[in-house]
Image: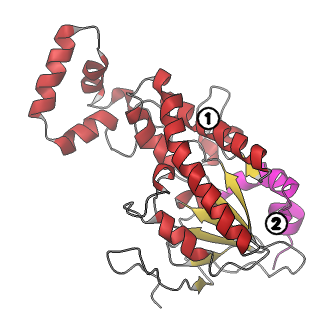
Amino acid sequence: MKLGWSGKTYKGVPEVPFRKAARKRKQLASVRQDLPLAYFIGDSHVSVFSGIDAIDPGYPAISDSLFPNVRICRLGAPLAATMTREDATEGGRAKAFSLLSVIEPGARVFLSFGEIDCRVHIPRRAGFEGSGIPMAVESAMVNYLHFADEYRSQASARGIDIGLLSPPPTATFDSMDDPGHLFRMLRKSRNNHVARAAYRVLKNLIPRSKRMHLNNAHTPAYADAWALRNQALGCMRDRMREYCQQRDLPFIDMFGPFLGTDGKSARHWFMDEIHLGVIAIPEVAADFAACGIPNFSPDIAGSTA
């Protein structure tokens, strides 16, 4: 079975192989019979649990980890808001449900989605205004948490428990100085008729693909200022925590511990501009242990062969 994805449809998902090694890994953690088995399923942010600073292979591969009894399933770049849709571009829903057929009963699954929503789509849907962020986040969460309910139900039928991870802080990149800043200022000028007229003229003259760059930032990977993106992530974190508390599910905050005192994402926790590095794991090891997953505790992780 090939590890890459083939075909244009996500229906009839192929059998999921188990991949024992990933690039740059010299050794794998020994299997520990006395530890729980934990799966991390989601977007590229699950890669941090592999134990190395690299993006894990994508679905349908399941990667082992340098941490004992930890396995990673990177589904691509699905949005939390589209996990209820069978026709979503990344096919995240079908991929996630297909994995349940190969996950061992008794395992714990942690789902990690939402950072891409908060980095790009939610600020845009909020009109790039802080006042619109809570409503835009709630709209995304209605869909995602409905998916979580469905996933929990099917997982429970197979003897598998689930938990949620809040998405980590978004990149510190601030788009205020990029070429699209003036364009976005004109778009936001609701009380200035001249600015609004100028915006409408530019909107009609500039191709849609170029407007995407100007609206979001120098690259569509980032939407406006870092503060707006982290505001969205904080709202999403709080909503996920509330959901887990109501259902007595494990929840790990992957957002708060990695902010600086100024509210910005603390750069030293990251392996690149977007993804947390392995250096971040000790910060949440105690939280995982409190949820019955001691696999990241220093005395256990450090003792693996």
Instruction: Give the alpha-carbon distance from disc 1 to disc 2, as whole Å.
Output: 27 Å
x, y percentage for residue 241?
71, 42
Check the image and report above or below for 18 versus 123: below
Q: Secondary structure at mark 2?
A: helix
Q: Secondary structure at mark 1?
A: helix
| Residue occupying image coordinates x 89% and y 64% | 299
For residue 5, what is the image quadrant? bottom left
Is residue 49 shown to the viewer in this render?
A: no
Residue position for label 2: 295
The numbered dot on residue 136 is none
Check the image and report above or below for 80 versus 64: above
x, y percentage for residue 198?
15, 18
Q: Do the residues under discs 1 and 2 have CB atoms within 8 angstroms?
A: no
For residue 300, what is the image quadrant? bottom right
- Judging depth in this view, the residue of 151 and 47 nearest the camera is 151
Work out whether mark 1 precedes mark 2 in sequence or the reverse, and give the earlier one: 1
| Residue occupying image coordinates x 49% and y 39% | 139
Residue position for label 1: 234
- Judging depth in this view, the residue of 6 and 229 nearest the camera is 6
| Residue occupying image coordinates x 58% and y 32% | 264
Q: Amino acid at mark 2?
A: Asn
| Residue occupying image coordinates x 48% and y 64% | 92
For disc 1, the neighbor class at 10 Å (few under 14, some 14 to 19, many from 20) is many
Q: Is residue 18 magenta?
A: no
